[in-house]
Each structure stands twice: as structure tokens, then as C-alpha cells.
Image: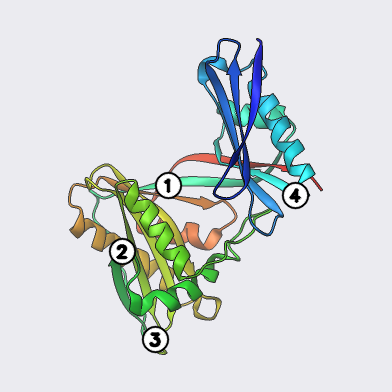
Amino acid sequence: MIFRVTALVNPDNDSPAWIAEGGDGRPLGTAFLRVPPTGGTADLRISVHPAERRAGVGTRLLREAIDAGTRRGLTALLGEPVREGSDGDAFCAAAGLRRVLALTYTRLDLSLTPSPHEAVSGYRLVHWEGTVPDEWAETYARSRVAMDDMPMDDAAFEPDVWDVARLHWVAEAVAARGEILLTTAAIAADGEIAGFTEVVVAGAGTGDGQHYGTGVMPEHRGRGLARWMKAEQIAHVRARFPELAGLLADTADSNAAMRRVNEGLGYRPTHRSLLYQADLA
């Protein structure tokens, strides 16, 4: 196959991108790097049209991304999850990328009777939809560090830096897709958010919702907050979206604590995905 690769740049963040085109100009595939301001590890996304696979397009795009990352002094490129046994899994392994994390995907059938749960003494829960209310914005931004130490195995994971502006940006991005972001947070006696859990639901309120993050601040762990927050959020989602069929979650295989919480709430495995990484330094 004869094709060409054109380098592009995202003007919003100076991150590189590439498009592969056939000799007749038809698009074959794309690659994107999301380079954080501090450098280090960049997120890599490669997509090749199914009809154009196994012809060297993905390999060429990967080489372009690795060369660009090396020139920028990055330490690693971290790919997106690929389903175990899929074409993406086979491509990553054949390309010599290193498998760094395994994720188990689970689903809660909302037609089933919910699991019983108990409140955690000394805390209260608040729920909000969309953008965080002003009264909780600052403490919510501080609480986001609760996810910084989540198990990531060998992945060169670099936590995001959160502030109120980023919280607003995420909520606005979800809303722009026509989806609804719902957050449940546990408030400690001192008024600070001790933990949170998020789920995103399609605007129509049908299909399956998707869990985003769940985190508990280190000093508040071991008291059952994660289970309580998720159970109450499930009840809230049931009432808010009676036509919703289920809730989806993905958890690192090594995150035994969260896997126990989800299993206890009725989540059942559907499949596994793998993360691969290109080490540059």
C-alpha cells in the first residue's frame, strides 16, 4: 500500500497529531499525543480504519509518535485501553509495546434488587448534577488528590493537577456531549470533602451509565466511605433515571479494595482490557 503521513499540531495545547492518507487521498488512520505541560508521559491514541489494518499504517503512525516523543524529551507514551484478545491487543504486542496494566470491566444490572448498606457515622453525603456548586468547589478540587495513589501497576501514570477551573471545564465538556455528570461526595465534620464518586449518564437517561472516578482521602479510608457513597449514588441514579439499564465500571486488577466494593454492590465482570506503553527513556 502506498500512503503518506501528514504531521499536524493541536493549536490549543501544542500536542502533535498525524493523519495517514492513501494515494487517492482517503483517510486511513490517525494518531494523537496529549503532552502534559510538565512533559514526562504523554497519552497516545492511534486509530486505523478496520479495512486498512495489517498494512503498516498503525506501525508507521506509532513510529511517528515515538520519534516526536523522543525529540520532546518525553519518558513514555501510554496507550488507551485495548480489549484483551482484540486487534488492538495484537497490534500492541506485535509492535513491542510493554503491557503495564490490566483492567477488569464490570456492570451493575439496575433491574436487580439493590444491596443493603449502612451510613458511615461522622459524615454526610451531598449530591450535585453538572458543575460543582460554589460552596463545594474549593474543597472538591482539593479532594481530587484522593485518586493520585490509585493502583496503576507499571504504567507511567502522572496525576492531573486539579483546580476549580478544571472542575468546571470537565463538567462543561460532559454537558457539551449531551451527557449528565452526577457527583456524590462525603462531607467530614470539618466541612471538607473526604471522598467522592462520579457517574455519567446519557442525556436521554437510557442505556448504561459510566462510572468515572471514586476516591477517598487517605486519612478517611478504612471506614466504608467508598461503598456508602457508591450505594447512595446508585439509589440516587435509580430515582433520577428510572429507564437506565445499568452502570459500568472499570477497575485495575490490582485495586483489590475497589474490586471488593463493586462486587459487594452487585457489579459483575464483562471483559478485561490492557494498557500498553512505549518507554522512551
User: Mark 3 touching mark 1, by CB under 8 A?
Assistant: no
| Mark pair 3, 1: CA separation | 33 Å
- Classify mark 4: residues with Cα within 10 Å, few (<14), some (14-19) or many (20+): many
Mark pair 4, 2: CA separation: 39 Å
Q: CA distance from mark 4 to mark 3?
A: 40 Å
Find the distance from the CA under tag 2 to the CA under tag 1: 17 Å
Q: Amino acid at mark 1?
A: Thr
Q: Residues within 10 Å of mark 2 (few under 14, many from 20)?
A: many
Q: Which mark is residue 106?
A: 1
Q: Which residue is mark 3?
A: 191
**Circle 3 or circle 1, nearest the eye:** 3
Residue type marked 3: Gly
* CA–CA distance in space, label 2 to label 3: 20 Å
Q: Which numbered disc, 2 or 3, marks the residue that appears first in the sequence?
A: 3
Question: In the drawing, does residue 107 fall left or right of residue 158?
Answer: left
Q: Which residue is mark 2?
A: 233
Residue 274 pos. (x, y %): 59, 41
Residue reaching furthest to the right: 281
CA separation, marks 1 and 4?
A: 33 Å
Whichever of labels 1 and 4 marks the residue nearer the N terminus, that label is: 4
Front-lying residue, 230 or 240: 240
Q: Which residue is mark 4?
A: 74
